Amino acid sequence: MSQLVEGRARPMGRVFVSLLVAILAVGALRADLPTDVEVYVADSRARPGKIYQVGLAPYPQTRFERRAGGISALAVGPDGWFYFVDANDRFIFRTDGREEYEVHRHSTYIRDLAFDSAGRLYFSEATGAGGDGTIYRLSVDRSESRVYRHVPLREVEGFWSGNFAFESSGRLVVSSGNRRPAGVFRMQGRRFVRRYGHDRSIKGFSILGSGDLIFADFRHRLFRLEDFETRSLVYEDDRFEWLSDVAVSRPPSDSRCTIRGRLTGGDELLPLTLVYAKGPDLSWRHVEGVRPASNGTYVLSGLPAGRYWVLTDIRADTGADWEPDFRRIDCRGTVTGIDFVLR
């Protein structure tokens, strides 16, 4: 088979090969991420802001997209929800992957946020070289914040853009942020001590269970730092412009799970409706669908454990007027109460 190009016959096989090379050229140039965690990133240049998962496919997978505004820093909470901020705004938001909800409102810009091993939420305010920074801890109901620790510029080489995280022991670690060269500073006693230097930016970062850091370089690369000494490139994708943060989450450990729920309302729609679970780990590699019982109850069982989208669907050929619904859940063991109202 051939294609006419500028008056000459060109074999379609060559066209296909050229197209494939072009597609691969804009894909992830390198991906050597940890396999025991899910890795999420934010690109502060993206508008509207998005949360991406990387490492599952040759391209970033969008897990959440805002209607307006950016996302410069993110964390995965103990409830499995994403928490995020826009560094040019004063709000903390959370999302289940569908809608965003305000968690806390500060008096000035919030630069970063992180959870400690006890599940407590912290955030930072900083002005680069303009003055000392501050890390706050939120109350349990997240209505109030109190100063947790100040970050003196004299202890972090004169610049801090607000990036921080906690080791599993609770020890605080901060990085310079969007400056070159940059450093990583670890709390020792009552002061920060420089543990690592890099000729690129060290923007947002997360700390693995091993104690290794994964950090973004405020361009399109992720690096792994072992023992504050050995640096290795673990991800690179030039589709990103300003990778500003990276968050990790360990997937559920249970091998199988069951989802139970009930559909109510819209009795005429019930016989036409199916309930699907797509996952695990939001990759949609496993799709399971069931028709609810006459009383609206449904059971999805034998699913590989992980995070799922659970959604209602209806046959397109019915012509029925209805509103689809879906939600994101962590599926481990038996999860109940995943109910939907048919409209």
Image (cartoon, rainbow, N blue to C red):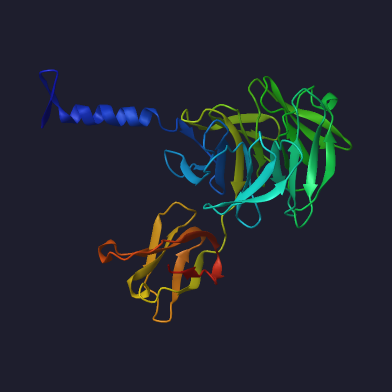
Q: Is residue 319 left or right of residue 175?
A: left
Looking at this view, is 89 or 225 the one in front? 89
Name the spot of residue 288 as percent of width and height, x first.
Answer: 39, 64
Look at the image and tell me in which quarter the N terminus lies: top left
The answer to whether any part of residue 210 appears in the image is: no
Looking at this view, is 22 or 296 the one in front? 296
Where is residue 267, by image quadrant? bottom left
Residue at horizontal 74%, vertical 34%? 174
Residue at horizontal 55%, vertical 69%? 333
Residue at horizontal 72%, vertical 26%? 183
Q: Is residue 320 above or below residue 105?
A: below
Q: Is residue 162 left or right of residue 93?
A: right
Q: Is residue 119 above or below residue 1?
A: below
Residue at the right extreme? 190
Look at the image and tell me in which quarter the C terminus lies: bottom left
The answer to whether any part of residue 77 appears in the image is: yes
Residue at horizontal 74%, vertical 25%? 128
Q: Is residue 177 above or below residue 93?
A: above
Q: Is residue 306 above or below residue 263?
A: above
Name the spot of residue 89 as percent of width and height, x first.
Answer: 67, 37
Residue at the bottom extreme? 295
Q: Is residue 1 left or right of residue 324?
A: left
Q: Is residue 197 left or right of residue 242?
A: right
Name the spot of residue 298 as percent of width and height, x first.
Answer: 44, 75
Looking at this view, is 96 or 102 the one in front? 102
Where is residue 318, by image quadrant? bottom left
Name the spot of residue 314 as percent of width and height, x first.
Answer: 34, 65
